[in-house]
């Protein structure tokens, strides 16, 4: 067996010691040492699909973007509108370059009229902060926006799965939503009453928690931002309440089953959101970097398209494997894995648009063997209800 | 943790001689399965195939990765652990026992002398 163990100087989240003490296996990811698994990826995937899992996602960035020009700056940088987003809500969208390529995908929360919290990917935090600084200088003479990197001062814990709402409700001693709750007929406000892509604040054991109803697994759930010094305590309370600690291995399988893109695979600075089939997160009124390219692609299509691939068996298509039609290369796998939930292999791939119709029979070159696959619509897995 | 009745490769395979027979069993170590994570698929040679000393003999896939498997010895495959096709998790749950992979008829038993014993293997993985 060949193992690749490359030593590297990586950052550690505030939960690093918690992971090591719990026997997690640590691997480098995006410049951080992160747990890839605790007990085992398959069991962790099942815990999230059937009950609840928790993930340390503190490696992702927390950028506070505030000031009178904050919404205006974000409008020029993001494919989703910041000025239209109401306080209390969150939005998923892209940070594009002038060619429509994706510098990063992100969720941002509107905290108040002139304050936003933006979550870049771990490996892109520096690139995003630099890009924002440059754009601020270009558009507003560097004035009216304050960007504060809160990544090292805070921890971020995702609680995901059908039991996530019950667990978080049970632990919160008080809760106030960031915006008026839609359905709250005389009931005590609770995190479970938050709609998807909204946020609130509360306390667990007197420690302040920011709660977004967001996630990356295809299940219901929350992401909890806490002070760094509180993260280990909150993590322990969540595990005591029945949530299973999960690693990046499970997170990657869960997001792939749910058809969610991972930057560096389905998104990159050379891949546009239109090619990745994510035009619903690109606003149509323009005015942001890359809008012209994306508008054109939306109307006229793109030479390649992201598709889902499925195949029976357990030997999976992996990233960078060739996709074939009649022996000719017509695409490349971007992510692939055995899916424990669906008990077959699944992959996402960019293929020539002519082969992107769902139900197209193609092959993947799995280390010299042409394996039959079928294109399918995304996601592979959608939760009931 | 690593049984001292067998020999080990630096690629994390083990080989153990069977009492009263001139065959050996081959598998991967606890350390290897722990590094791989959940094993979902094992591709092995067929009965009758030749395997070579420290030459590639197959592939093992976990949820996250594919790795090559190397034969610790030269010989001919006399049996493949058929249970692994349906229960690849045996490699995780019992790597030194029910998770064995191949039974091989050795052509050169002297090759065993060049492999690591349990103590040397433990020292080796301690440095990884």
Image: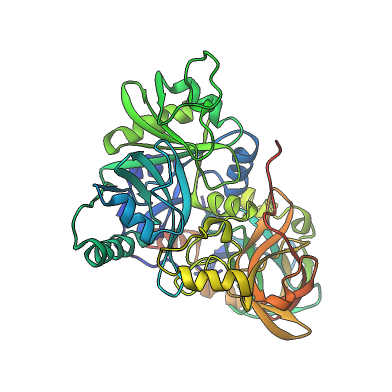
x%, y% of residue B65? 57, 64
Q: Would residue B20 be found to the left or right of residue A57 on screen? A: right
x%, y% of residue A111? 34, 38
x%, y% of residue A139? 26, 64
Q: Would residue A24 be found to the left or right of residue B89 on screen? A: left
Of the 4 image quadrants, the one containing the C terminus of chain A is top right
x%, y% of residue A47? 60, 38
Closer-to-camera residue (A104/A28): A104
Q: Residue furthest bottom?
A: A328
The coloring applied to the image is rainbow
- Residue A219 in view of the camera: yes
In the image, is residue A74 above or below residue B13?
A: above
In the image, is residue A85 above or below residue A181?
A: below
- Residue B71 in view of the camera: no
Q: Would residue A182 be found to the left or right of residue B16 on screen? A: left
Closer-to-camera residue (A277/B122): A277
Residue appearing at x 18%, y 56% in the figure:
A143
In the image, is residue A85 above or below residue A6?
A: above
Of the 4 image quadrants, the one containing the N terminus of chain A is bottom right
Residue appearing at x 58%, y 52% in the figure:
A255
């Amino acid at each position: 067996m060949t193992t690749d163990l490359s030593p590297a100087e990586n950052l550690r989240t505030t939960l690093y010691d918690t992971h090591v003490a719990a026997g997690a296996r640590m691997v480098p990811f995006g410049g951080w040492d992160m747990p890839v698994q605790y007990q085992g990826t398959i069991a962790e995937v099942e815990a999230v699909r059937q009950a609840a899992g928790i993930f340390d996602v503190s490696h992702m960035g927390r950028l506070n973007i505030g000031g009178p020009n904050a919404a205006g700056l974000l409008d020029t940088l993001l494919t989703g509108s910041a000025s239209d987003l109401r306080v209390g809500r969150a939005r998923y969208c892209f940070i594009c370059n002038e060619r429509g390529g994706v510098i990063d995908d992100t969720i941002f929360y509107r905290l108040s009229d002139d304050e936003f919290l933006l979550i870049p990917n771990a490996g892109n935090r520096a690139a995003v902060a630099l890009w924002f600084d440059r754009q601020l200088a270009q558009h507003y003479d560097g004035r009216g926006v304050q960007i504060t990197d809160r990544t090292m001062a805070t921890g971020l814990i995702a609680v995901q799965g059908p039991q996530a709402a019950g667990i978080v409700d049970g632990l919160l001693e008080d809760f106030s939503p960031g915006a008026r709750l839609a359905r709250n007929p005389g009931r005590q406000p609770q995190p479970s009453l938050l709609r998807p892509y909204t946020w609130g604040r509360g306390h667990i054991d007197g420690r302040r928690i920011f709660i977004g109803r967001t996630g990356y697994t295809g299940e219901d759930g929350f992401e909890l931002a806490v002070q760094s010094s509180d993260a280990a305590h909150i993590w322990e309370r969540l595990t005591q309440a029945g949530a299973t600690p999960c690693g990046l291995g499970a997170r990657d399988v869960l997001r792939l089953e749910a058809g969610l893109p991972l930057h560096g695979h389905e998104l990159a600075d050379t891949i546009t959101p239109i090619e990745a089939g994510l035009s619903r997160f690109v606003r149509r009124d323009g005015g942001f970097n890359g809008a012209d390219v994306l508008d054109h692609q939306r109307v006229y299509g793109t030479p390649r398209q992201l598709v889902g691939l499925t195949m029976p068996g357990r030997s999976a298509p992996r990233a960078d494997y060739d996709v074939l039609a009649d022996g000719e290369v017509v695409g490349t796998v971007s992510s692939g894995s055995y899916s424990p939930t669906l008990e077959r292999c699944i992959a996402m791939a960019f293929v020539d648009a002519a082969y992107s119709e769902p139900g197209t029979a193609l092959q993947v070159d799995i280390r010299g063997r042409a394996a039959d696959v079928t294109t399918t619509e995304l996601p592979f897995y959608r939760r009931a209800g | 943790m690593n049984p001292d009745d067998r020999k080990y490769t630096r690629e994390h395979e083990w080989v153990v001689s069977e009492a009263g027979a001139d065959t050996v069993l081959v598998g991967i170590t606890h350390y290897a399965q722990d590094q791989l994570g959940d094993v979902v698929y094992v591709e092995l040679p067929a009965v009758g195939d030749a395997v070579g000393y420290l030459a590639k003999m197959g592939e093992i896939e976990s949820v996250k990765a594919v790795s090559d498997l190397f034969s610790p010895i030269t010989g001919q495959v006399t049996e493949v652990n058929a249970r692994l096709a349906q229960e690849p998790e045996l490699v995780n749950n019992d790597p030194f026992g029910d998770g064995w992979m191949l039974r091989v008829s050795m052509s050169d038993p002297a090759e065993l002398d060049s492999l690591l014993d349990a103590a040397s293997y433990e020292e080796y993985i301690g440095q990884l």
